[in-house]
Amino acid sequence: RAAQKYNPDITCWISPWCPPSWMKINGDYPVVSSKYNNLSEKQNYLLFGTESAEIDEDEMKLTGARDGVFPRQLATTDYMIQDPRYLNAYANYFCRFIDAYKEQGIPIDMVMYQNEAYSYTPYPGCAWTAEGTIRFNRDYLAPALKRNHPEVKLYLGTFNTNRQDHVEKVLSDSELNKSISGMGFQWEGRDILAAIRAQHPDWSYICSESECGWGSFDWPAAEHTFELINHYLGNGCNEYNFWNFILADNGESPWGWKQNALIRVDSKERKATLTPEYYAARHYCQFLPKGSRIVGWKGDQKGTMPVLVAVNPQGKHVVIAGNFADSEAPFSLKLGDRYINATLAPHSFNTFLE
């Protein structure tokens, strides 16, 4: 409601971390046991269907490294009970949630069935197989939305996996595809965004979660976020969502993960500080209003000069560039019959307006 005072047209999308515990095969909110929860270690065998499988409760902390596939082993079991009564009830939960928020004046315009189905978490989560994903979205959630909330779009996600063959397996169901408006990618999902978008160019794509970092609140973390935004917008996403806007002190979650945010609050002094990541985001948020079009980009995770070229609603070019090197760097960009020639300071974010 506070945000609506600044932007009355704001809309929201929803993606649950976890079904109600009584709808899950382990009867609890986490997926795997941990010192941070009360789940019995004996139930970990459910994930891969064998007691000999090695469970790594910190595997999701490895995301973002991009040194292999994630997850290293896919779940073989749906943690959501696959009984039609449960699946139907869960689909109705989504609709009841949308109703409740609508009564409070908060519009929901898009739904995704599961947050990070590929993080097998010691905190609330839910593992799904490709078959379970298809079944729930195609046979239960899509019909429930069409029946009760035809104005709400169904997206697939959030995909935090780079296992392209698995994602393509989910997308191979033609009947499901008829109900899908788009997809959400985050973390390792960035690796396969371009390939999946090429296969389904008519859908809409979003970055469903910025990477939350390790609690450093420093300039390298901001450079990482700057590159992420460049990557997702450059690869056709029309929306970029942040995970933490505001965190207190060292940004530590209840299960021991220190994270970053755009604003950091000192809880003792009750003072807020704008972090370097805030300024990385501001270059895009301030100068690329709704209705802007991306017309060019370059950059990769290991690159030192990501560049994005857009045309704003007024028809003017906006060029956003970063220099992550330790020394200043020449920058030259041709726009039609004109050039931008500049020198970018080391470790800097830059925006050029036509």
Image (tube, rainbow, N blue to C red):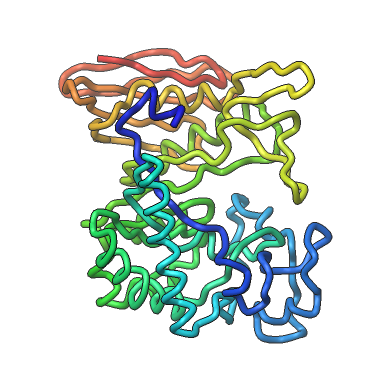
The answer to whether 253 is drawn above or below residue 20 in the figure is: above
Residue 143 in percent (x, y) is at: 29, 71
Task: Residue 42 in the image: state x and y as whole percent.
Answer: 80, 80
Q: Residue at x 74, y 29 (%)?
A: 249
Left or right: 278 as drawn, with respect to 203:
right
Q: Nearer the viewer, residue 99 or 326?
A: 99
Residue 145 found in image quarter = bottom left
Given residues 90 and 286, the one toward you in this image is: 90
Say which residue appears at 58% left-offset and 81% top-offset. 76
Horizontal side of residue 335 vs 42, given as left or right: left
Quarter assignment of residue 335 = top left
Instruction: Locate residue 185 relative to residue 255 in the image: left or right.
Output: left
Task: Give left or right: position of 293 versus 267.
Answer: left
Image quadrant holding the C terminus, namely top left
Is 92 in front, or is 43?
92
Instruction: Give the image location of residue 173, x and y in percent.
Output: 31, 77
Q: Nearer the viewer, residue 12 or 237?
A: 12
Q: Is residue 245 visible?
A: yes
Q: Residue at 77% across / 84% down in the picture?
A: 52
Pinpoint residue 51: horizontal percent, then vertical percent. 76, 85
Most distant residue in the front direction: 103
Residue 199 appears in view: no
> Is 275 above or below relative to 67?
above
Quadrant of the frame with the N terminus? top left
Residue 17 position by quadrant: bottom right
Q: How many marks on residues? A: 0
